[in-house]
Image (cartoon, rainbow, N blue to C red):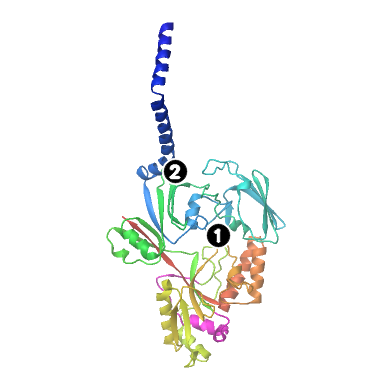
């Protein structure tokens, strides 16, 4: 037995000496092959084994400004949004507030980043204007504000992400391709739940290139498309339409224009606009699904006779007067319908197409983003020169907006924003027309 063992040892030593270079090369190749397989396996398995969706996205994005719908798949925030716009815990267990200024959050202890590291309070990287974030321990976070800000918890619903788009959510990024300017051209997301599909997002600079990619078979699914481009007639395509309630199509009046400073004139122009039957009518700047939405508002029902009677006495009715409605290309059809209605009652009106917002516009037709929280300070408060595009100024509205963002009590805020909607809609710095629709287009 001893001789047999010695013989085997001698044989192995001789074999290794004779083939040392080949063995070393084989080990090296095996190492790199194993490393390669570990790196590409998630992407390969995602595409070859699971159901795979290829979705086209209109717009050029970087890692810092990905669409919220994609970021919400990759991660979540300290808080999450309920359908009515209220905040609820996501990465936190509980929180408490002292003097409306100091917020203390207890974090969930069992969360893990996609790179395998434990989530801790020091990872929270929100930038809060007028606020300071302090880590008390691994799972306790303190936010101190300079002044009360009731929408804070809604702000904290923004998904938390580390460099490299590493998140906490149900999907992780397993592949990314970038353009020459470091903008993203393609992202592949792998779900942790095998029942969910792998998703590859492909980004295109404009609508036309996105639609062409769909026709050529590069993508199978388009989301939030504002035009149908004839897809509704394709036999192998399913087109679904839905109203979106976080945006509202509205007419904004420029308060720097003398012809539009009279509230009765603005109201009369609203009465002259016929309804948009294929859309859900809007009457307020706040979403109808929000906890703060109020129905006790002035309704501008179509009444061209009353509108003509009021406007016939205004400066707009003179033969030399001209009312210009500025709009973006996507809202041109809506703008033309409005202008036709105004012309019909004797107001000389024209459409001007401009993708920007000119400072000297008279009347502006735009899609307005509705915040999740009813706080609309940036849109209507008189000091907000860059975002108050109507140049609207009202001491009453200013006070309501100030109170609304400093009050934490929900019932008090509900009353404040009911008053805000009532007085704003009556004053008519803007006329809220309808909630826009978008299309989802997919292959059968």
Residue 232 occupies quadrant: bottom left
Please give the range of residues in magenta.
254-282
- Is residue 314 something one can see in this rendering? no
Residue 29, image x and y in percent? 40, 33
Please tell me whether mark 2 or mark 1 is closer to you in this view: 2
Looking at the picture, tell me which residue is in the foreground, 117 or 77: 117
Q: Is residue 200 left or right of residue 151?
A: left
Give neighbour class at mark 2: few <14, some 14-19, many 20+ (Cα, 10 Å). few
| Residue that label 1 marks | 85
Give neighbour class at mark 1: few <14, some 14-19, many 20+ (Cα, 10 Å). some
The quarter of the rendered structure image containing the C terminus is bottom left
- Is residue 263 something one can see in this rendering? yes
Residue 270, image x and y in percent? 49, 80
| Residue that label 2 marks | 193
Looking at the picture, tell me which residue is in the foreground, 175 or 161: 175
Q: Earlier in the sequence, mark 2 or mark 1?
A: 1
Spot the residue most to the bottom. 319
* Residue drawn at 42 percent across, 70 percent down: 279
Residue 273 lies within the magenta run: yes
The circle drawn on residue 234 is none
Question: Which secondary structure, mark 2?
Answer: loop
Residue 282, image x and y in percent? 49, 71
Q: Is residue 192 above or below residue 296?
A: above
Looking at the picture, tell me which residue is in the foreground, 67 or 36: 36
Residue 251, image x and y in percent? 50, 76
Residue 190 lies within the magenta run: no
Question: Which secondary structure, mark 1?
Answer: loop
Spot the residue most to the left. 235
How many angstroms separate mark 2 from mark 1 (CA)?
27 Å
The quarter of the rendered structure image containing the N terminus is top left
* Residue drawn at 41 percent across, 24 percent down: 20
Question: Is the C-beta separation of discs 2 and 1 under 8 Å?
Answer: no
């Amino acid at each position: 037995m001893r001789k047999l063992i010695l013989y085997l040892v001698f044989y192995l030593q001789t074999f290794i000496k004779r083939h040392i270079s080949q063995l070393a090369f084989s080990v090296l190749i095996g190492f790199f092959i194993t490393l390669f397989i570990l790196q590409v396996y998630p992407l390969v398995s995602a595409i070859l084994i699971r159901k795979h969706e290829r979705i086209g996205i209109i717009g050029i994005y970087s890692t810092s400004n990905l669409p919220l719908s994609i970021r919400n798949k990759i991660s979540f925030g300290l808080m999450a949004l309920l359908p009515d716009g209220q905040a609820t815990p996501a990465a936190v267990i509980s929180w408490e507030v002292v003097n409306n200024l100091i917020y203390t959050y207890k974090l969930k202890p069992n969360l893990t980043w996609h790179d395998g590291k434990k989530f801790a309070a020091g990872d929270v990287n929100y930038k809060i204007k007028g606020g300071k974030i302090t880590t008390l321990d691994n799972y306790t976070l303190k936010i101190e504000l300079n002044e009360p800000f009731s929408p804070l918890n809604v702000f904290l619903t923004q998904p938390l992400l580390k460099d490299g788009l590493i998140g906490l959510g149900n999907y992780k990024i397993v592949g990314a391709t970038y353009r020459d300017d470091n903008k993203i051209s393609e992202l592949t997301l792998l779900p942790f739940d095998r029942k969910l599909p792998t998703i590859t997002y492909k980004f295109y600079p404009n609508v036309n290139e996105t639609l062409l990619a769909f026709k050529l078979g590069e993508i199978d699914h388009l989301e939030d498309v504002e035009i149908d481009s004839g897809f509704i007639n394709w036999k192998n395509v399913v087109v679904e339409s839905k109203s979106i309630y976080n945006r509202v199509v509205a007419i904004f009046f420029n308060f720097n224009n003398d012809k539009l400073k009279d509230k009765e004139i603005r109201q009369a122009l609203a009465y002259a606009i016929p309804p948009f039957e294929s859309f859900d009518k809007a009457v307020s700047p706040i979403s109808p699904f929000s906890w703060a939405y109020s129905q006790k508002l002035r309704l501008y029902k179509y009444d061209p006779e009353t509108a003509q009677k009021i406007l016939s006495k205004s400066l707009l009715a003179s033969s030399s007067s001209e009312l210009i409605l500025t709009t973006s290309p996507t809202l041109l059809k809506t703008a033309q319908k409005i202008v036709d209605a105004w012309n019909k009652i004797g107001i000389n009106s024209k459409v001007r197409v401009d993708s920007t917002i000119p400072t000297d516009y008279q009347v502006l037709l735009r899609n307005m983003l509705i915040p999740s929280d009813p706080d609309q300070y940036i849109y209507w408060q008189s000091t907000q020169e860059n975002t108050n595009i109507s140049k609207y100024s009202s001491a009453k509205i200013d006070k309501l907006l100030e109170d609304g963002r400093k009050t934490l009590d929900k019932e008090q805020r509900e009353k404040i924003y009911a008053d805000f909607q009532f007085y704003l809609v009556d004053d008519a710095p803007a006329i809220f027309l309808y909630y826009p629709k978008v299309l989802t287009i997919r292959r059968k």
